[in-house]
Amino acid sequence: MTEIRYVDLDGATPDEAVVVIDVLRAFTFEPWCFHRGAHRLLAVDTRQGAVALRDTHLPGALLAGEEDGRPIDGFDLGNSPAEVADRDLGGATVIHRTSAGTQGLTRTTGSGVVLAASFVTAAATAAHLRVLAPERVTFVITGASLGRDGDEDLAAAELIAARVQGLDPDPTPFVDRVATSDAGRMFTPEGPAWAPDVDLPLAVEVDRFDHALLATPAPDLGAIEITRA
């Protein structure tokens, strides 16, 4: 049976197989980008790195992301899945920087395999891991950072882990934890402007997409290439 372990963002290091979880919202946002037609998606860890990558290698690329949840001045997109769910991204290259999700990808570079995941890709992520059959899978709970409990990410990780082990639990109790997590409680009509309540239902659409997200180093670009697996 596959060994499962969970670490917070500070504990993220390379391992045999790593699943970086960010439900609210990086790895809900990214599959929506592909769904809306994005041709290429690259993850970086700093805003300066995103700008330099665009200016040096990928003129015309869209910059997306946030710092402390807030959209970054001068970027084309924030980190809201609702922002791209109705947007035509046909053929676009998107360079993505976030405070949690893309940080987890950077810190686990060098692993045997790294997957970026959330509820919307849960089944596909578990299926990909079952095919790989690693001896150990480390789940990085990126929401457990910046003083937050990260329970929305832990819930998604526990659901995926159960499926990796061949179980088929009711996803409802896992999904219910998203709205009550420290991060989830911000996504309400009374919450901050950068946390629109319309993002919450998009983040809990279990198995909305039928592909996992594979994160592979692109050293020539100083970035991480996100592809559909």
Image (cartoon, helix red, strand yellow):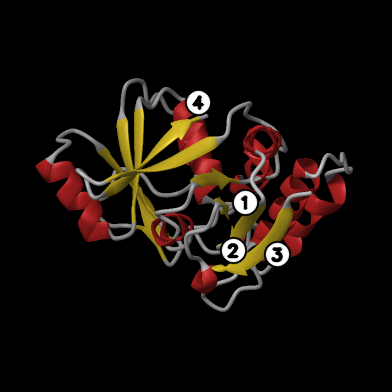
Q: CA distance from mark 4 to mark 1?
A: 21 Å
Q: Residues within 10 Å of mark 4 (few under 14, many from 20)?
A: some
In-front residue for pair 165/148: 165
Q: Secondary structure at mark 2?
A: loop
Callout 4 amino acid: His
Residue bearing the label numbered 3 = 151
Q: Earlier in the sequence, mark 3 or mark 4?
A: 4
Residue 63 in picture, x, y percent from top left: 28, 44
Relative to residue 65, is residue 203 drawn left or right?
right
Q: Secondary structure at mark 4?
A: helix
- 3 and 4 marks in contact (CB < 8 Å): no
Q: CA distance from mark 2 to mark 1?
A: 8 Å
Callout 3 amino acid: Asp
Residue 5 in picture, x, y percent from top left: 68, 62
- 4 and 1 marks in contact (CB < 8 Å): no
Residue bearing the label numbered 2 = 191
Residue at 80% x, 52% y is: 174
Q: Earlier in the sequence, mark 3 or mark 2?
A: 3
Residue at 83% x, 44% y is: 171
Q: Secondary structure at mark 3?
A: helix
Residue bearing the label numbered 1 = 197
Mark whose residue sits in front, 1 or 3? 3
Q: CA distance from mark 3 to mark 4?
A: 27 Å
Q: Residues within 10 Å of mark 1 (few under 14, many from 20)?
A: some
Quadrant housing residue 107? bottom left
